[in-house]
Image: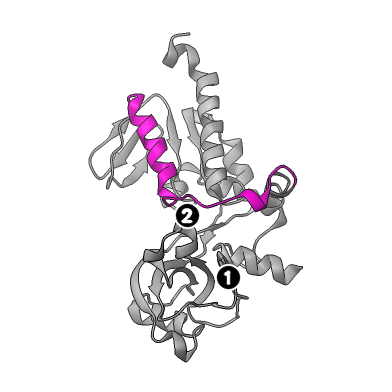
Amino acid sequence: YKTLVDTLCQGYCYPPIHDYKAAFGVPIYPRAVLLGDATKSDMFRHGSRSLSDALLAEFTKLGGELRLGCEVTGFDGEVLASSDGPHSGDVFVFAQNADHPLMRDLIPRSKPPIRYTRFVTAVVRLRESYQPQVRDWGAIFFAPVDAPRAQVLSMINLQRLYATDALRDHYTVNIRLPADTAVDDHAIIAAVSRLCSARHGTPELVTYEVWPQTMPVSNEIFIETVRALQGVGDCYFAGDYLGCPSMEVAVATGLDVAQLVYKNHRPAMFGH
């Protein structure tokens, strides 16, 4: 059972099971196993970005403004210093990665260091189907190997996912990267090739994206410190590091903060 859970978790870009504490993983199981139906679950048909695009559309519709490529460099409790100048406000919500340098200003007494797993997601094309003997398979997870090299830990059948023959023999692979491993075409192709036989040929690399900070490896002390500071100095915190790292937790903590802001600042900000 431990090997199964470890294989699934690392295939989803989580850390090894001995680094991933039950305090962060267990709370999501009642929702996924008892209240949900895994057989009816699916991926975003147009990619995970469809969720963030929908949230952004609603945000801007309500009058919000989004600035991209703007790095926050400091915070003195009242003004944010950034690469495009200072920003002030009534309330500040911080949703950056837990290991962002700014967190040292916000939570000076904490001692992270919250580290992150490091993965690259690539789309590759093989000469033949990877598992022709298994009809209509959707995803495969590979047992992690304790070796200082890039390793494919999961593979998704894109033809099945998007229901189109245009993606026949195309696969998305999640590749775990050791901290000091260089990322280039050769390393990615080599990692995929270790899974393939001669009939697959040399994998064709279509595209790839490096995730230098994929999943946070949180600890209880840091999270308890962040939670204790919610609302102090009109500052709030959201992010997937505050629970079981996932898109769901990231959204849920954002909703929690929105409710806290509305509750604590309703007369001043909302006029009722």
> Contact, CB < 8 Å: mark 2 with mark 1?
no
Q: Where is residue 232 in the image (x, y as percent from the top left)?
A: 53, 30
Q: In this view, does 50 lie above or below 261?
A: below
**Identity of the residue drawn at 38% across and 31% down:** 59
Look at the image and give the residue range highlighted in magenta: 34-63
| Position of residue 166 in the picture relative to residue 239 (left or right) | left
Mark earlier in primary sequence (2, 1): 2
Label 2 sits on a secondary structure element that is: loop
| Residue 54 in magenta stretch | yes
Observer able to see residue 218:
yes
**Label 1 crowd bin: few (<14), some (14–19), many (20+), radius 10 Å:** few
Please determine whether, in this image, residue 26 is positioned above or below residue 17.
above
Res. 268 image quadrant: top left
Q: Which amino acid does label 2 sit on?
A: Asp
Q: Which mark is residue 135?
A: 1
265 and 254: which one is in front?
Answer: 254
